Image (tube, coloured by chain):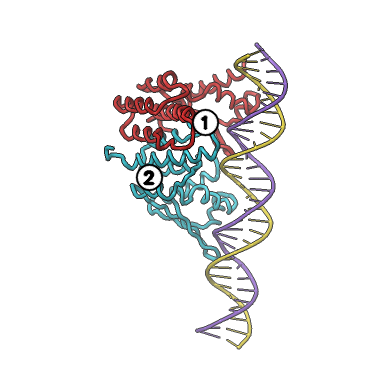
Chain colours: A cyan, B red, C purple, D yellow
Amino acid sequence: MRISDSIEQFIKEMLGEDSPEVELKRNELAEYFGCAPSQINYVLATRFSPSQGYLTESRRGGGGYIRIVRVVETGPQKLAYLVRDRIGDSLSEEEAQRIIAHLRESGMATPSEADLMSAALSGRSLAVPLSPEMKAALRARMMKTMLLALANKGNGG
Amino acid sequence: MRISDSIEQFIKEMLGEDSPEVELKRNELAEYFGCAPSQINYVLATRFSPSQGYLTESRRGGGGYIRIVRVVETGPQKLAYLVRDRIGDSLSEEEAQRIIAHLRESGMATPSEADLMSAALSGRSLAVPLSPEMKAALRARMMKTMLLALANKGNGG
DNA sequence: ATGCTTTCAAAGTCAAAGAAAGTCAATTGT
DNA sequence: ACAATTGACTTTCTTTGACTTTGAAAGCAT
């Protein structure tokens, strides 16, 4: 088992229970998991980034802390934001998958809808001779178009 | 006896027993069979491809893994048929829309799933400078990949 | 008490090392 | 010829540690 995953899980359990917000001590947590303190930063960067729906703030020095806040943007505004601001003319596969994971977790897409999107944007789908740039452009368009379809859900189009 | 066949059999036994899903370590498996790790990739490519009804995902780095999922053909063997026989290397937009309409009407896809597929394959999504042949090839791949995702619906991924 | 200075306790950064899987071309086997 | 096998090289993800930056509290001078 990866230590990163354990730490991720631990934090998510803390977040899940009560509040959408945790405060923790980097060094304590590192000691608890028996890893280097900077490992915590790694976990925050790879699993609690803004694009994954989390904000973090921290303070150094005596009595320092790290606070993690889960941002619960849902619904149409979020979709509109994704289409308008977040996704430009180019989208990597990793980023696409992250967005889809977020849609699924926040309930904006059902698991099978998310799987469909994921399939459409997967490397397997796009396994045709195309430059990486072109694929990224294609992904961006596809993602936007699908998000619009998702936003229209239930509106009988 | 070919080593590839042994590995194939081994994996299929794991899949057969309990779950429609196995997770394995490439290096361990290679060591177990006394072959080069890349041999595993060969087996996956030649015996566990999507068109043979399997999906694979993997992760590199520390604690990496390979996961193989058998796509079960519950009810809709139709989907398997579509993937295997009906859709070739090329698919027009009209044909794609016809297939999607059929999926919706027959209840194999919910309206919003159908909309998503439709969006992914629409002219709007594919509005990038590409030859028509290339787009048709792309459509075929995307459709197949999405159909597999659909076939796997409800199989907890 | 008020403002500097030192000191120490956090958290941050970054690059290097390590771990695992992917790719691909050359070789071997049937 | 075609399928299988191998190994060198690449890419991706994780873990660690040395060094930096920031903040707070204590010490000291006025």
Chain of residue at mark 2: A
- Label 2 CA crowd tier, 10 Å (few <14, some 14–19, many 20+): some
Quadrant housing the C terminus of chain B? top left
Q: Residue at x 58, y 21 (%)?
A: B7
Chain of residue at mark 1: A
* Residue B7 relative to residue A149: left or right: right
Instruction: Pick whichever of labels 2 and 1 is earlier in the sequence.
Output: 2
Say which mark, if any, is on residue A106. Answer: 2
Q: Could you give the CA–CA distance between mark 2 and mark 1, rounded to whole angstroms?
A: 30 Å
Q: Is residue B19 visible?
A: no
* Residue A109 relative to residue D5: left or right: left
Residue B108, percent from left and from top: 33, 26
Residue A14, percent from left and from top: 43, 51
Position of B5 relative to A92 (above/below):
above
Q: Quick one: SS at disc 2?
A: loop
Q: Which residue is mark 1?
A: A127
As shown in the figure, which amino acid type bears the numbered disc 2? Ser
Q: Quick one: SS at disc 1?
A: loop
Contact between marks 2 and 1 (CB within 8 A): the answer is no
Quadrant housing the N terminus of chain B? top right
Residue A91, percent from left and from top: 49, 43
Q: Is residue B98 visible?
A: yes
- Label 1 CA crowd tier, 10 Å (few <14, some 14–19, many 20+): few
Residue A117, percent from left and from top: 41, 36
As shown in the figure, which amino acid type bears the numbered disc 1? Ala
Q: Residue at x 35, y 28 (%)?
A: B97
Q: Nearer the viewer, residue A13 or B128?
A: B128
Q: Nearer the viewer, residue A33 or A90?
A: A90
Q: Residue at x 59, y 30 (%)?
A: B26
Looking at the rendered structure, whether the residues under marks 2 and 1 are on a common chain is answered as yes
Say which mark, if any, is on residue A45. Answer: none
